[in-house]
């Protein structure tokens, strides 16, 4: 990774944070909870810039501009809203599980090869 890429990434993140801070208070609170949830669940897209989170900010900006409360945008079950956003996304847990499964398959294959 080049230094210019790191600097650009920081600039993008600062601009993103500024957009979040410009949202109404209720939107900021829900955004921060969504962000925490995603950091725990670990969708891989989070490491690819601010794409997923920026999409949420776009949605929240539109909702706020139209006078909607944040729960009118997300629904009352914010966790379900989050899960729906990442239902087709690969998570770090998925990647870990795949690697463990592959190691297990290799070990089992070695065991069956010795029996032959």
Image (spheres, rainbow, N blue to C red):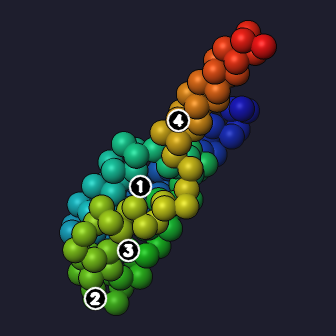
Mark 3 neighbour class, 10 Å CA radius: few under 14, some 14 to 19, many 20 or more: many
Query: Residue 39 has which mark?
Result: none
**Which residue shows up at 23% across the image and 60% down it?**
29
Disc 2 designates what residue?
Answer: 67
| Among the two numbered marks 4 and 2 on one chain, the one whose residue lies closer to the N terminus | 2
Residue 19, x across and y down, in percent = 42, 64
Q: Nearer the viewer, mark 1 or mark 4?
A: 4
Disc 3 designates what residue?
Answer: 60
Location of residue 76 with respect to 11 vertically, above or below: below
Residue 87, x across and y down, in percent = 48, 62
Q: Is residue 1 visible?
A: yes
Lateral position of residue 1 relative to residue 99, left or right: right
Location of residue 68 with respect to 112 vertically, above or below: below
Query: Residue 97 has which mark?
Result: 4
For the residues marked 4 and 3, what is the alpha-carbon distance in whole angstroms? 33 Å
Query: Residue 17 has which mark?
Result: 1
For the residues marked 1 and 4, what is the alpha-carbon distance in whole angstroms? 32 Å
């Amino acid at each position: 990774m080049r230094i210019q890429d790191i600097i650009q990434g920081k600039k993008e993140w600062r601009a993103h944070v500024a957009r979040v801070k410009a949202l109404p208070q209720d939107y900021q609170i829900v955004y921060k909870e969504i962000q925490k949830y995603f950091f725990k669940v670990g969708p891989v897209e989070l490491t690819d810039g601010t794409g997923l989170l920026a999409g949420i900010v776009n949605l929240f900006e539109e909702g706020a501009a139209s006078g909607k409360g944040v729960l009118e945008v997300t629904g009352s079950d914010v966790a379900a809203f989050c899960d729906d956003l990442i239902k087709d996304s690969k998570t770090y847990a998925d990647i870990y599980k795949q690697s463990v499964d592959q190691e297990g398959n290799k070990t089992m294959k070695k065991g069956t090869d010795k029996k032959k």
